[in-house]
Image (cartoon, rainbow, N blue to C red):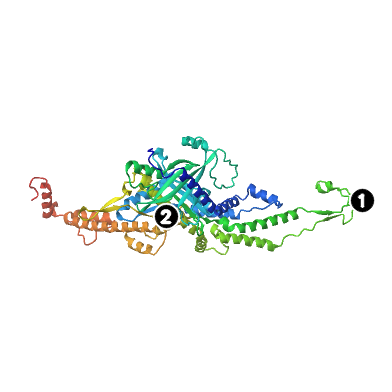
């Protein structure tokens, strides 16, 4: 390193980063408390909750799973609508590139086990109100070649500027992680002897296991933006305590000093923080929302309190108790032992020597109240009986049942659409990372037309900025291919697949796929709405066009055959239509004596001499 170069990120700058991080953590305290409390509720039973109950002298406390079932049902709805990207071009020259990206992006997601990541983020979103993803570049993947990395991030380990709704508006964005000291020293030898104590500790959930922080240190990643050359440049710094591990701003400064580069793009050319937040019920002034536990916790508490009271009352009724006079001489051991047929007493046994304690069972009004609270929780969360497949006994028509289920799933569909918007943002980040880093080709196994397996090689040449030329070859500037992202469900639900198959069979039975009825089928589909409508209409239009062109060429073939080889016209007509030739095509009748007509003889003569020099004239 050149000693004359003054690097912008030094120990003083690291101390400033840590101060800002502490400020961001204090501003996020309410979000962390809510997230920790929600996780405790999700676990139903945990040592802290049970210890508080026993210390208060409450004894047994019922813990039911109504709220648990709400979250499980909503998670199932989210996974039934698992997303899939469909890349659409904005300019006609990018159609092929969009088609290829639509095929390889699902492969990249599969290589990142994104279905599990999506599932984990949905659990996080439903419980705490916010799911967090990170979409970045991992230079160690693919054997050192590097590739896209997508992972779920713990909400307690990320920090942003208090008061911003969009994290892209935050001045800094921090991500912390607790790592083992030995592994850190192996990876970064400059940390030897410098890992003494935790300079910063993030809030943690109450784990079932006992997690010790001994021998661990907090690694801090800080992302921030600088305005350079009229655009936002994203910089990244990684450090532990007061030891710098990497700083993109220092690297850029060294490249400018050594190579004379005026502009260095920073960490990622897209200039955005590589984190995406997916909130369930959004709130103003924060990228985080609140979840179903925050919404339904009060109702679940009421159900548990009533359930506890009912159980205690039932136990009182199931276990009779007695009043005994202090001067009564009843053998308690024999009385309590149900196997003893005789209970000995001393002296006279009066009616008031032993009397059963009165028991009054609860009124049915209390049971109705509990049922009303349960119904309130289900209505509040949208997890009604209809949404889980149950309908009233009076509803028997299939269309009515489908309508009720469709109406009951509005809340889940709304949350799914919000997740689709987040998913589209992640896909956009993936495309930008491909544009920046896929300089060397990668191999992908994709599914081509008709389900045929294909192996393709792909790089970023077609995604790079391309020169635009005007008249007479004058260069007008550069164009970067830009794409629109349409998110569609992957149809993982058995009900969805069945309905799609039923619809296709109905179209087939009604003759929609008949090539001679394509115009009628297209007119009917233009007023319909179903998944895959556009693709099906394109296929029907193509089939109809091909059929019309084929019919036209058949007419040409019949006319030419009748003119030059009339003896084959009848057979050709029968082969095309499966019927005899129509009356307007006269049957061929050879000349008497088996000779051919003069016109046919002249044609054969020309054909025989056409290959000779000057022949056929």
The residue sitting at the front extreme is 4
Name the N-terminal-most of marks 2 and 1: 1
Q: Is residue 119 visible?
A: no
Q: Residue at x 49, y 41 (%)?
A: 242
Instruction: Name the residue beneath numbered marker 2.
Output: 487
Relative to 380, 369 lies left or right: right
Q: Position of residue 142 (x, y in %)?
A: 40, 39
Question: Crowdedness of circle 2 by 10 Å Cα count: few (<14), some, many (20+)?
Answer: some
Relative to 592, 317 lies left or right: right
Which is more toward the observer, 12 or 462?
Answer: 12
Quadrant of the rendered structure where residue 484 is?
bottom left
Which is more toward the observer, 381 or 345?
Answer: 381
Relative to 556, 307 lies left or right: right
CB within 8 Å, label 2 to label 1:
no
As drawn, the label of residue 404 is: none
Which is more toward the observer, 534 or 261?
Answer: 261
Which is more toward the observer, 141 or 472?
Answer: 472
Q: Position of residue 248 (x, y in %)?
A: 41, 44
**For residue 55, above or below residue 559:** above
Instruction: Name the residue beneath numbered marker 1.
Output: 347
Q: Position of residue 493 (x, y in %)?
A: 48, 53
Question: Crowdedness of circle 1 by 10 Å Cα count: few (<14), some, many (20+)?
Answer: few
Q: CA distance from mark 2 to mark 1?
A: 88 Å
């Amino acid at each position: 390193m050149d000693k004359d170069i003054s690097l912008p990120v030094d120990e003083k700058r690291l101390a400033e980063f840590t101060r800002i991080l502490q400020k961001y953590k204090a501003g996020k305290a309410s979000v962390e408390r809510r997230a920790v409390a929600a996780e405790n509720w999700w676990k139903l039973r945990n040592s802290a909750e049970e210890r508080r109950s026993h210390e208060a002298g409450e004894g047994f406390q019922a813990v039911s799973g109504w709220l648990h079932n709400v979250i499980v049902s909503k998670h199932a709805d989210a996974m039934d609508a698992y997303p899939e990207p469909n890349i659409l071009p904005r300019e006609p020259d990018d159609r092929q590139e969009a088609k290829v990206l639509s095929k390889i992006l699902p492969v990249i997601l599969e290589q990142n086990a994104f279905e599990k990541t999506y599932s984990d983020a949905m659990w996080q979103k439903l419980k705490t109100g916010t799911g967090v993803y990170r979409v970045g570049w991992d230079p160690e993947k693919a054997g050192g070649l590097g590739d896209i990395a997508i992972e779920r991030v713990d909400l307690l380990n990320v920090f942003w500027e208090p008061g911003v709704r969009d994290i892209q508006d935050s001045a800094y964005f921090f991500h912390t992680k607790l790592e083992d000291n030995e592994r850190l020293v192996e990876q970064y030898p400059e940390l030897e002897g410098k890992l003494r104590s935790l300079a910063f500790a993030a809030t943690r959930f109450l784990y079932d296991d006992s997690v010790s922080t001994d021998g661990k240190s907090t690694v801090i990643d800080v992302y921030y933006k600088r305005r350079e050359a009229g655009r936002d440049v994203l910089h990244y710094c990684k450090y532990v305590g007061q030891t710098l591990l990497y700083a993109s701003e220092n690297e850029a400064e060294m490249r400018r000093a050594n190579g004379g580069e005026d502009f260095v793009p920073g960490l990622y050319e897209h200039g955005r923080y590589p984190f995406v937040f997916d909130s369930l019920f959004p709130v103003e002034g924060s990228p985080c929302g609140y979840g179903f536990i925050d919404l339904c916790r009060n109702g679940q508490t009421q159900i548990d309190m009533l359930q506890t009271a009912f159980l205690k009352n039932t136990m009182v009724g199931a276990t009779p108790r007695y009043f005994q006079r202090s001067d009564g001489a009843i053998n308690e051991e024999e009385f309590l032992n149900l196997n003893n047929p005789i209970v000995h007493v001393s002296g006279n046994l009066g009616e008031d020597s032993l009397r059963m304690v009165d028991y009054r069972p609860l009124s049915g009004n209390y049971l109705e109240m509990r049922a009303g609270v349960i119904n309130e929780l289900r209505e509040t969360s949208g997890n009604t009986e209809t949404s889980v497949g149950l309908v009233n006994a009076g509803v028997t028509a299939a269309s009515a049942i489908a309508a009720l289920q469709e109406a009951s799933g509005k809340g889940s569909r709304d949350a799914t659409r919000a997740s689709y918007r987040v998913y589209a943002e992640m896909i956009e980040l993936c495309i930008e990372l491909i544009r920046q880093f896929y300089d060397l080709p990668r191999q992908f196994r994709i599914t081509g037309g008709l389900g045929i397996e294909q192996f393709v090689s792909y790089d970023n040449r077609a995604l790079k900025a391309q020169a635009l030329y005007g008249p007479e070859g004058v260069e007008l500037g550069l164009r970067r291919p830009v794409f629109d992202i349409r998110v569609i469900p992957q149809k993982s639900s058995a009900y969805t697949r069945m309905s799609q198959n039923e619809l296709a069979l109905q179209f087939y039975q009604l003759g929609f796929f008949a090539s001679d009825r394509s115009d009628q089928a297209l007119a009917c589909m233009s007023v319909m709405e179903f998944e895959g409508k556009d693709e099906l209409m394109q296929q029907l239009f193509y089939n109809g066009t091909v059929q019309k062109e084929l019919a036209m060429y058949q007419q040409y073939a019949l006319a030419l055959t009748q003119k030059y080889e009339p003896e084959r016209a009848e057979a050709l007509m029968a082969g095309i239509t499966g019927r005899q030739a129509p009356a307007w095509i006269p049957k061929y009748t050879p000349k008497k004596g088996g000779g051919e007509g003069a016109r046919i003889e002249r044609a054969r003569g020309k054909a025989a001499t056409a290959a000779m020099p000057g022949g056929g004239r």
